[in-house]
Structure formats: structure tokens, C-alpha cells
Image: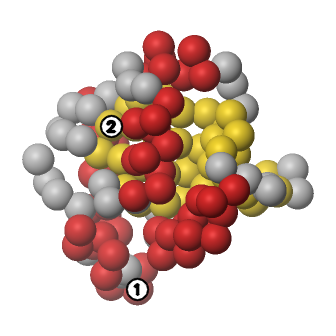
């Protein structure tokens, strides 16, 4: 598992939140797929209170951030975001029980390997 970039993400969101959002996919599709409204998704990204882990990806000469939100032991959501003139939400998809189980397994491996330890992981709740 990689380093958690949640602090870097929060700083970027503070800079770009006044500029607004762009959507990489049709908003109707994203609302249907995730079962929540556009305003709820925007609010969740701006607040970042429930984010469990942020992964930084460098693809095609751009930097993307994958935000993992875990709501319970069976449900969660992943946002893929990049920063241009605005906050661009590339995609959003739900994650289920098996993905969360694998995620927690990787987390336990990380916690028990002291050379890769990161104190931010203490915020994760084991449901």
C-alpha cells in the first residue's frame, strides 16, 4: 500500500473549492450509480471528514487522487479527482464488501510492518 496523501489533498481542496467542480462523466449517470445527489458528492469532497485514505497516481502526465470513503464494513465509495482550473471529478464508483475486506487486509499488513508505518492509519475504524 502506498503513502496516504490526505493532508496534501485537503490543502489543494482549500485552494480550488471556490473555483467549482467539473465532471468527467454525465452527472445523471454518477447520481444513479452512487445513489446520491450532485450536491452531496460535492459536499463530501469539500469536507473530506470521512476520507479514510488518499492515493496519489501519476498517469498520462497528470496527477490524480483516489479518495477512499468507508461508511461501514459493507459499503464505501471511491472518487477519482484531479485539479485543473477547477476540481475535476473523473469518476465515482461504489465499493462493496469484498473490496473493503481486501483493503483492510492490506492495512493490517502495513500496520504490522514498522518500516512502512504511517500514523494517519489510526483513523481507520475496523467495523
- Give the answer, above or below, for where 17 lies relative to 10: above
Which callout, 2 or 1, points to the residue nearer the camera?
2
Disc 2 crowd rating (10 Å Cα; few below 14, some 14-19, many 20+) is: some
Q: From the viewer's perspective, is 10 left or right of 20?
A: left
Question: Which color scheme is applied?
Answer: secondary structure
- Give the answer, above or below, for where 90 lies relative to 13: above
Q: Residue furthest bottom?
A: 115
Q: From the viewer's perspective, is 98 left or right of 46?
A: left
Kindly state the secondary structure of the residue where label 1 is placed: helix
Residue drawn at x 56%, y 75% as measured from the top left: 11
Disc 1 crowd rating (10 Å Cα; few below 14, some 14-19, many 20+) is: few
Q: Position of residue 59 (x, y in %)?
A: 79, 52
Residue 107's quadrant in the figure?
A: bottom left
Q: How many marks?
A: 2
Front one among 28 and 78: 28
The residue wearing badge 1 is 115
- Give the answer, above or below, for where 96 lies relative to 125: above
Residue drawn at x 23%, y 61% as measured from the top left: 124
The residue wearing badge 2 is 76
Q: Position of residue 118 (x, y in %)?
A: 37, 80
Q: Position of residue 13 (x, y in %)?
A: 57, 64
Residue drawn at x 29%, y 45% as measured from the top left: 70
Q: Kindly report the distance in space between the C-alpha atoms of the residues bearing marks 2 and 1.
A: 28 Å
Q: From the viewer's perspective, is 98 left or right of 12?
A: left
Residue drawn at x 32%, y 60% as measured from the top left: 49
Label whose residue precedes the other's in the sequence (2 or 1): 2
Q: Residue furthest front?
A: 18
Q: Position of residue 60 (x, y in %)?
A: 87, 50
Front one among 110 and 87: 87
Res 98 visible:
no
Amino acid at each position: 500500500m502506498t503513502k496516504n496523501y490526505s493532508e496534501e489533498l485537503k490543502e489543494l481542496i482549500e485552494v480550488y473549492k471556490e473555483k467549482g467542480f467539473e465532471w468527467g462523466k454525465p452527472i445523471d449517470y454518477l447520481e444513479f450509480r452512487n445513489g446520491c445527489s450532485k450536491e452531496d458528492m460535492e459536499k463530501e469532497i469539500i469536507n473530506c471528514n470521512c476520507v479514510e485514505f488518499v492515493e496519489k497516481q501519476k498517469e498520462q502526465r497528470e496527477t490524480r487522487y483516489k479518495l477512499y470513503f468507508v461508511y461501514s464494513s459493507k459499503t464505501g465509495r471511491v472518487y477519482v479527482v484531479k485539479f485543473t482550473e477547477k476540481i475535476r471529478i473523473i469518476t465515482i464508483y461504489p465499493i462493496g464488501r469484498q473490496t473493503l475486506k481486501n483493503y483492510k487486509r492490506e492495512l493490517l499488513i502495513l500496520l504490522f510492518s514498522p518500516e512502512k508505518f504511517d500514523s494517519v492509519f489510526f483513523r481507520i475504524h475496523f467495523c
